[in-house]
Image (cartoon, rainbow, N blue to C red):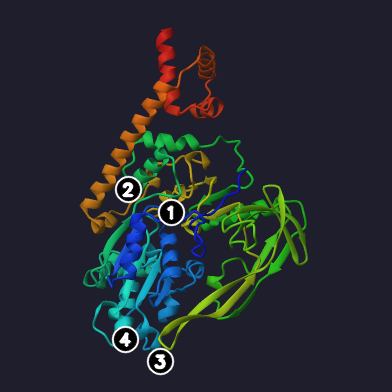
Amino acid sequence: MAENKTKLDTGTVLPENLIITDEFKGLINKIENSNNNMFITGKAGCGKSTLLEYFRQNTIKKYVILAFTGITAIKARGKTIHSFFKFPPRLINSKDIKTFRDKKLLNELETILIDEASLVRADLLDAIDKSLKKNRKSKDPFGGVQIILIGDLFQLPPIVGGAERAIIEKLYKGPYFFNSKIFKKAEIKAYELTKIFRQSDEKFINLLNKIRISKIEDNDLALINTRVQDDNFKVPKGVILLSPKNSKVDDVNNKNLESINSPQFEFSAKAKGNFKENEYPVEKNLRLKVGAQIMLVKNDNSTPQRWVNGTIALISKLEKNKISIDINGNIYQANKEKWDKFEYRVTGKKIISSVVGTYTQYPIKLAWAATIHKCQGQTFKNVCIDMDEGAFTHGQTYVALSRATEINGIFLIKKITYSDLIFDKRVYEFLGNKLETKYSKEVIDYEKIIKKKENTAYDKSAWSNDEDLRLLNFYNKGIPIQGIVNIMNREPSDLRRRIKKILKKLS
């Protein structure tokens, strides 16, 4: 099985074959050469994380990178929003807006970039505005600091606890950052990255587009559900299972680890400085056995590079302070890695990032299964999806399916149903009718292109008598179309047309 490489999710390494499109270059120039507040969006796999990293490496602006979750912040060499602004981990009110003793950093700041903005709540964006105004002594939106929000509102939404939901709904029209009081005042303009890098199959891209905007039809569900496996299916080695809830994921990982008949080893991490437990990128006490399926969660810095963040491997050998891993038959030794947590300070008129905490552990997670939430931003060549009791939030099914690079790389444990396609209409209310129309037109245009290519391919691809006999034989045996696809290496639509033609001749 080919190595599962994660291309665009690390936030720390630019792809070797980076393609700088005109829209990519234009957005970088807008951020760099203006003080305009922006929301940069785009479909899964369009290069949002790459744009953030490119800016980080090339800007001359005084900036900080922030994110809602600790793991995302660490990947982006930034901080969490809460730690940077000293906000409490709950609903934020005016009393929670602290006056900084040292205001040098905030006064020197020109730009704040916020990654995975779909997770940022309305009260959090308002609190950012209030803190910057208070500490910079400015009445301008965000105290005059340029705010760049990066994310996809069709992916996972902000988390709102049961006790907070009623208050959020009373104070705002919804939980999203665009529901905040400051959003309109700050004149935050939306820009979109449109080129998809993660997937290249036009049929799959079109299917994902439909799921993303909740414009799905019966034939679309039938297409994705051709990937449902039979009852005897076992998840292949090197393939991760994604599921909505932690309970399912933990159960799968623990059962798989317990099923291995070999000694268990435990490897302990070391946390130093200001590194909180909920920010740990991997388990503090890592339990492993020989044969365990794992994910490497940090890029290898060797030359040539042996793995990247997201590579799936197997444990081949364990000793007291040594872990050997198997990647596609190649055996490597994994070493402990260090994660740095950054703090920002001003030296002269420059903003300098400094390490305030470190976490040292093997860059390994058990990887028979992971939550869909944890894998937002990841890319897998092959992925197994078990919706279990079903999706429970906006964008969840879209995020799961769009982790794959091609439809044949998806293995479904159970069918995707209409109830799994949860869509929050407030997203369209914000984005407006123009964007809804644009996305719907994209779907129609894609379908026209696909149909034209299929017809062309059909006309040019002749069928021999032997192929007709084989196809008829498979059909009479009741072999599913997807099975025949794998045997005859033909498109499903091509096979269906040919079967109709053969049966018509025989009637």
Pinpoint residue 28: horizontal percent, then vertical percent. 35, 64
Nearer to us in this view, 384 or 37:
37
Residue at image point 28% right, 71% down: 34
Which mark's residue is nearer the viewer, 2 or 1?
A: 1
Residue corresponding to mark 2: 213
Residue corresponding to mark 1: 19
Marks 2 and 3, Cα distance to the nearest angstrom?
46 Å
Q: Is residue 78 above or below residue 192?
A: below
Which mark's residue is nearer the viewer, 3 or 1?
A: 1
Residue at image point 42% right, 72% down: 66
Crowd around label 3: few <14 · some 14–19 · many ≥20 (10 Å): few
Residue corresponding to mark 3: 101
The earlier-in-sequence mark between 2 and 1 is 1
Residue corresponding to mark 4: 136
The earlier-in-sequence mark between 2 and 4 is 4
Which mark's residue is nearer the viewer, 3 or 4?
A: 4
Marks 4 and 1, Cα distance to the nearest angstrom?
38 Å
Marks 3 and 1, Cα distance to the nearest angstrom?
44 Å
Is residue 415 visible in the rendered structure shown here? Answer: yes
The earlier-in-sequence mark between 2 and 3 is 3
Which mark's residue is nearer the viewer, 2 or 4?
A: 4
